[in-house]
Amino acid sequence: MVASISQAEEAMCRRRADPETPQLSKEGDIMLGGVFSFHSKWQGRRDTYMHKPLPLQCTSFNLRGIQYTQAMLLAIEEINNSTDLLPGISLGYKIYDICGSISRGVGVTLALTHGNEEISAASDAACARPGQVQAIVGVGHSTPSMAISTVIGPFHIPLISHFATCACLSDKTKYPSFLRTIPSDYYQSRALAQLVKYFGWTWVGAIRSNDDYGNDGMATFTEAAQQLGICLEYSVSFYRTDPPDKIKKIVNIIKTSTSKVIVTFLAHMDIDLLIHELSHHNLTGYQWVGTEAWIFDSQTASMDKHHILDGAVGMSIPKSHVNGMQEFILNVKPLNSTRNELFTDFWETLFNCKFKHSKSSAENQKECTGHEVVTGVENTYTDMSLMPIFYNVYKGVYAVAQALHNILSCNRTCNNTVKLDPFTILQHIRKIHFTTKEGDEVYFNENGDPAAKYEIINWQPTENGIVDFVTVGLYDASLTADKQLKLQNKSLIWAQSSQQVPLSVCSEKCPPGTRKVLQKGKPVCCYDCLRCTEGQISNTTDSSTCVICHPEFWSNEGRDTCVKKEAEFLSYEEIMGALLTAASLFGTCMTAVVAFIFFRYRQTPIVRANNSELSFLLLFSLILCFLCSLTFIGRPSEWSCMLRHTAFGITFVLCISCVLGKTIVVLMAFRATLPGSDVMKWFGPAQQKLSVLGFALIQAVICILWLTISPPFPFKNFKKFKDKIILECALGSAVGFWAVLGYIGLLAILCFGLAFLARKLPDNFNEAKFITFSMLIFCAVWITFIPAYVSSPGKFSVAVEIFAILASSFGLLFCIFIPKCYIILLKPEKNTKKNMMGKVNNRVY
């Protein structure tokens, strides 16, 4: 509005633009505005900015716009005829066509709010007037709704949309007067993400309308999808007015893509354009996921001649039925006397005919008579698949009426003296909560949105080529997250009429036993499956990591289960353990036989001449040595670990002490034959026994200290083998162990040295050479034992120690006692005192 002032005329307020005339109007006590798109396109124009732009020329008549208008008119008619709602008050309307144009939408909105008439304004008065309408119903797209809401927001004029779903419109700081009877895409986007996840599609393409509806909805879907582990291979946009080359680029992207699922946020006019282009390339076999904008639109289904969208799934507004609405929409009468341009375009489009003197450029069409019957045709106008959207328009009008009813304190009559203002009406609309005659609750939350409920629709083609929109599930945003999405037990039809759920993944799922490794430079849904390393498992599909097994467990061959490790120790049941046990028992028995022989022939010279007491003590010690090896076989326990090393240490010291005593006896005996020598009285039988006892006592003290300070204990060794547990005896104190071995080695070296010195004594009374051989074997065995023991793994180290014990024990037995047994049993003629004294054969060895 501007104020035009001159001397010849008074100040006038008038619109700068051309006056906007409503396409449909009716006077009433209270006026409502209606904004719909009776046309879907407009002719392009080039503004030179030198002259005022020409009025917008609308094209492509949209029958849906008339259906929405009829729904609004039905609600107004019912209210005007009602005695319960706004009794005595008539509602009027002014309905405009915006052709889907934002600029035209803003223009007609200004006309609705301030009118077209010139207004006389006093020089000291503001150029303003009350609003022409109390509320506006309509505007089926998000972008025009945003523009219109921005304009009327400061005036607090309510705008109730039936089909604008952009989540951005819930922002009351930007759009304070906007309300809607259709749920926000905030919920639909998340519902679509949950639906895609439900069917296991993690690799999808995305196509959206290049407007606020498509961009905002897809942004919300992308965010929700990423949280659910879904990746987008591509995300492209276009608008119905874009050049054909852009649509072709999108088709090429679809062709070269690997994803088989396409999620769309497209207006129905955009999806129609895309399907038309795809049909030229015969691009079928893709699984389409759609929104309420087209998923239950039979017009879109009828255009899909090449069955590109067959099997599509998506979210739709719950089905509804309004008594009398279908009949009201179809009951359009020809306006012969007052036929206007809107009616002409509508009638010609509806019946595909042309009036005389019509501006339509179509040729070869039959002539319209104005008496055609609507029920005799089948087209978009007679299709009632969008009844839920018609119902949204209907509920929007009733919401305004309920608010007015409350403001005017209506009972049997209404208070006509109440001055209405848009702000009061807006506040009451936000608070209304009523039930329609169909039993549906109508209310708005703090953002001006209704409750979010959707039906999940599946496109199922029938034999006659018509698509059946089958409800296969529900989504209710008011429930908890795990209960919001519910699929019914119905068989779904997928792309190309398949019964199997299509697969759309960048990488196949990683089976148990593997983990995901992301491919460089690709989304997280693209990965390779890497087998878990030894000792690690993954027991779930698509595991990101492998879990390390407990030290007592190991991974199986499939790397999907931790199995208990095999406990390895030298047992009696295995062959090696049985052989060593047999060898130990054989040595024990053999030593016992030798002891029996010596006892049987204890009075013979050869037994008596070699210190029979030390011989029997040595034989007893050898029996203990053979038997102590058995403590190394079997599962280690606390007592066996302490017994095996201490028993071995003490018995071997006892053996070496006896051998050392026998060696000293031989040396002393020959020294005693020298004149004046009394050596033997210092190393008689009592001293020999005490020396053996003393040597053994020292070893016993070492063992007691070892067991007291840090005794050996059973230990599970996890380090030597990955897949086995080595049950062994830990030394406790390594110093104690090597002290025991060192003491045995010291005595053995001392014994070997003395025996070596006595090697040249007379042969008949000389067992020093046998002791030398036995000590040589003993030392060789235990010297080689050390590297063999250290390098042997697991139970073999125990076997090496047992072998060393048996080998050294057999060496002592064979070298010292077998030659004597040979003489006793096979050469008794040599077992005489004369022979022992060297009178038969006195060779020097």
Image (tube, rainbow, N blue to C red):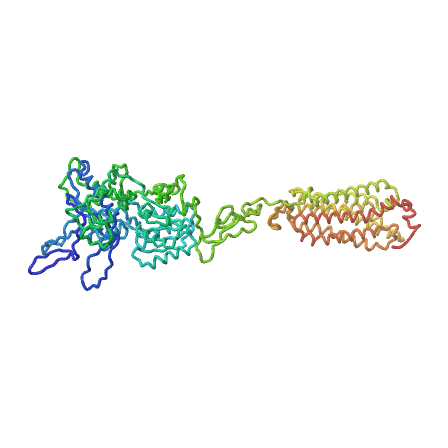
Q: Is residue 345 left or right of residue 727?
A: left
Which residue is the extreme one toward the right?
Answer: 840
Q: Nearer the viewer, residue 239 or 564?
A: 239
Q: Quick check: can you spot residue 252?
A: yes
Q: Quick check: can you spot residue 216?
A: no
Instruction: Residue 392 in the image: state x and y as whole percent.
Output: 26, 43
Q: Residue at x 54, y 49 (%)?
A: 536
Q: Nearer the viewer, residue 497 or 762?
A: 497
Instruction: Residue 504 in the image: state x and y as whole percent.
Output: 43, 50
Q: Is residue 536 left or right of residue 147?
A: right
**Picture quadrant of residue 433:** top left
Q: Residue at x 89, y 46 (%)?
A: 827
Which residue is the extreme one toward the top?
Answer: 412
Q: Is residue 693 left or right of residue 1?
A: right
Q: Nearer the viewer, residue 319 or 274?
A: 274
The N terminus lies in which quarter of the figure? Answer: bottom left
Instruction: Residue 293 in the image: state x and y as whole percent.
Output: 31, 48
Q: Nearer the viewer, residue 220 or 95?
A: 95
